[in-house]
Image (cartoon, rainbow, N blue to C red):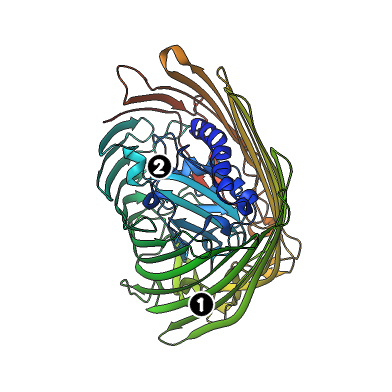
């Protein structure tokens, strides 16, 4: 089902990043090593208003990102794009429903997912997961960093961060004053249709962008020839931007993003590969308004970035009642989030100083109220942070970066409060460019996760089958999670000649998490278990990722592999009242990989791509939770695609035709607890025109 649509974008990354780094390095040689880590999606500099204005500064990441990509193929979902990247796993399958991202084994609230540097908060409301991801039509780059490696990121950075950079007007204009684009595609496995229409214009110092995306999927076809019941969703996304070059030293960007998904979908349960949970109607709606301002006069002491944002997220779910019980809880939850971030970069005496402050307020409420289901009270959370980072080029080859961040939070509901202050997280890293094309690095960083409103205050009764259920109990005393991550890696990038390039990236990490949060058993009410989110004293996660890319006029090779392991270092009772002894494996995604081959046919401006996605067999963990159960079987999925992009008389037209899961395998994705259905053979096609 999955395929590697990033081959061409990886080539662009490999070819353009060194050029961009050299340009920046020539401007100020104190940034030489850091700018090796900056990824450019274009070879030419952009006007000031189109450069990165987010307070998430380029130099805030002191070790290279685990993986960076720019989507070249919009025929597939963002989840499929991410799952094909080294270091990232998608929990819950790759369909456009609710997407949960895992880095280094950690997921949910422990992974910051940013859109233009704004945290797209994920929340787990008693098993109902809430997050939407931007469409590949709407972002030009996505990067993944590990725990604490970006000093500007606050709460949630225990497992790492994924940040999407949405497209700007210039990405469509490419120097023109007016540009439009239209795309239409479809696929067989979900009887799906996707469409996109975009418009960009520039007048003087002001540029505009409107980009609309719509998809519709129905009747998901599985590899065993059956149709998954209640599998349908309609997705709409819209992005609008205005960028203004106020002056040579000032720029402004106003952005509005809306993402909606409506439909019905079941999730398979852990004990049977053929059974499904209670289906439910869902209605998700997220919007994000962001204002970015940058002031960069012609001196090395001032580069101020200010970002103000407002988000609203509504999650409504109503089960479709059948005889199997209420496996999912009905809810109608709204979160409103406002934030302000300010930072400045100062270059002085071969030092790059980055310092800033931020404040965030989150308010949550539940419009669905019943004594027989989970309840989420009206509540609020305030998050504060202040940070300082010093990046020092000791020599032209060696860079040392150190930083510290102060974290503070407060939570309130009608009956309970929770707060924490004086929490410092620190980082230190060494980059060594021991040869012109080789970069070695090692770093230590700490991540911080304040208790979320849902983990603190969610309560009530949830029936998972007729006559059986859990009592969820609020835990206002939940402690924040702290991660201590050590990582090391090596990167090699070279242009062998004008037509050939090679890239290798290897990364290993060890992450010790204090106060790790899991569902835990706290008692009985009659015959019903009482459970709550509790802290496990210590958990350990470790793993590695490897990625290789080679491109030439006749063949393109792109491959990566990710492997992650985890265990609890202290015993605990899970929600089913089973004792999980110290040393037991954690329920996390484990090993997955990708191999892709591309064969350019230059005379007809075409590319043939083959792909192999695979996952190794995974033991269901921890085994004592459910007793003796079979392993989650591994799989290997083969794909084939043909793309055509004429460069002469029909310039502006692009077309693609492909097949995912050629051999129609019936397989399932696994997150350590649950199996999720996956597509059978899928034939897809897409055509676009840009003017």
How would you rate the neighbour count of disc 2 (Cα within 10 Å): few for under 14, some for 14-19, many for 20 or more? Answer: many
Residue at the spot 30% in from the left edge and 72% down from the top edge: 367
Query: Mark 1 or mark 2, which has the lower sequence index?
Result: 2
> Image point 45% across, 51% down: which residue?
164
Quadrant for the C terminus, please: top left
Front of the two marks 1 and 2: 2
**Res 473 label:** 1
Q: Which residue is mark 2?
A: 136
| Element type at mark 1 | loop
Crowding at mark 1 (Cα within 10 Å: few <14, some 14-19, many 20+): many
Front in this rendered view, residue 332 or 321 = 332
Marks 1,2: beta carbons within 8 A: no
Which x, y percent locates residue 553?
Answer: 55, 18
Q: Estimate the x, y position of residue 513 in percent, counting from the top left.
A: 67, 66
- SS at mark 2? loop
> Please, is residue 545 above or below residue 61 in the view?
above
Depicted 258 relative to depicted 361: above or below: above
User: Which residue extends farthest front?
Assistant: 298
Q: Residue at x 35, y 24 (%)?
A: 655
């Amino acid at each position: 089902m999955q395929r590697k649509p990033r081959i061409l974008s990886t080539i662009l990354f490999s070819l353009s990043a060194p050029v961009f780094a050299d340009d920046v390095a020539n401007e100020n040689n104190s940034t030489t090593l850091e700018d090796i880590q900056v990824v450019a999606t274009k070879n030419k500099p952009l006007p000031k208003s189109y450069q990165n204005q987010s307070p998430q500064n380029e130099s805030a990441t002191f070790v290279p990102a685990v993986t960076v990509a720019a989507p070249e193929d919009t025929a597939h979902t963002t989840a499929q794009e991410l799952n094909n990247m080294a270091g990232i796993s998608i929990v819950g399958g790759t369909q456009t429903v609710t997407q949960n991202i895992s880095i280094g084994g950690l997921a949910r609230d422990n992974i910051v997912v940013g859109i233009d540097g704004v945290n797209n908060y994920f929340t787990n409301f008693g098993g109902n997961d809430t997050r939407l991801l931007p469409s590949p039509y709407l972002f030009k780059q996505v990067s993944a960093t590990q725990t604490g490696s970006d000093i500007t990121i606050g709460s949630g950075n225990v497992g790492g961060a994924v940040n999407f950079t949405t497209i700007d007007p210039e990405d469509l204009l490419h120097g023109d004053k007016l540009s439009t684009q239209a795309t239409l595609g479809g696929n067989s496995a979900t009887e799906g249709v996707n469409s996109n229409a975009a418009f960009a214009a520039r007048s003087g110092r002001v540029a505009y962008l409107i980009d609309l995306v719509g998809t519709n999927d129905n009747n998901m076809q599985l590899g065993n020839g059956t149709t998954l019941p209640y599998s349908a969703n309609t997705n709409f996304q819209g992005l609008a931007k205005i960028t203004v070059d106020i002056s040579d030293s000032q720029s402004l960007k106003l952005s509005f993003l809306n993402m909606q998904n409506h439909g019905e979908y079941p999730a398979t349960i852990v004990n049977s590969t053929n059974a499904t949970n209670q289906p439910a109607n869902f209605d998700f709606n997220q919007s994000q308004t962001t204002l970015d301002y940058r002031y960069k006069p012609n001196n090395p002491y001032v580069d101020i970035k200010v970002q103000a944002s407002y988000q609203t997220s509504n999650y409504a779910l109503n089960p479709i009642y059948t005889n199997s019980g209420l496996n999912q809880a009905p809810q109608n939850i709204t979160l409103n989030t406002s934030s302000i971030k300010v930072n400045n970069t100062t270059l002085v005496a071969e030092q790059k100083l980055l310092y800033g402050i931020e404040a965030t307020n989150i308010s949550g409420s539940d419009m669905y109220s019943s004594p027989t289901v989970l309840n989420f009270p009206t509540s609020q959370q305030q998050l504060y942070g202040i940070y300082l980072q010093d990046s020092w080029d000791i020599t032209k080859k060696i860079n040392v970066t150190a930083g510290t961040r102060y974290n503070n939070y407060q939570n309130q509901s009608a009956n309970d409060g929770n707060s924490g202050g004086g929490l410092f997280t620190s980082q230190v890293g060494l980059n060594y460019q021991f040869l012109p094309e080789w970069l070695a690095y090692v770093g230590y960083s700490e991540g911080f996760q304040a208790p979320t409103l849902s983990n603190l205050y969610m309560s009530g009764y949830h029936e998972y089958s007729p006559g059986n259920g859990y009592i969820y109990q609020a835990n206002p005393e939940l402690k924040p999670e702290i991660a201590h991550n050590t990582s090391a890696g090596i990167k090699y990038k070279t242009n062998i000649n004008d037509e050939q390039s090679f890239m290798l990236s290897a990364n290993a990490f060890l992450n010790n998490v204090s106060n790790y949060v899991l569902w835990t058993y706290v008692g009985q009410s009659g015959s019903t278990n009482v459970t709550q989110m509790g802290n496990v004293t210590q958990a350990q996660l470790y793993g590695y990722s490897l990625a290789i890319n080679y491109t030439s006029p006749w063949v393109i090779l792109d491959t990566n592999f990710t492997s992650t392991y985890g265990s609890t270092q202290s015993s605990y009772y899970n929600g089913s009242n089973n004792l999980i002894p110290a040393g037991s494996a954690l329920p996390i995604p484990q090993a997955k990989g990708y191999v892709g081959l591309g064969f350019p046919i230059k005379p007809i401006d075409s590319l043939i791509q083959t792909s192999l996605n695979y996952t190794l067999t995974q033991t269901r963990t921890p085994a004592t939770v459910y007793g003796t159960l079979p392993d989650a079987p591994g799989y290997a999925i083969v794909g084939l695609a043909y793309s055509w992009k004429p460069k002469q008389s029909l310039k502006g037209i692009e077309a693609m035709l492909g097949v995912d899961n050629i051999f129609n395998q019936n397989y399932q994705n696994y997150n350590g607890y649950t199996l999720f259905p996956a597509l059978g053979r899928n034939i897809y096609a897409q055509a676009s025109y840009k003017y």
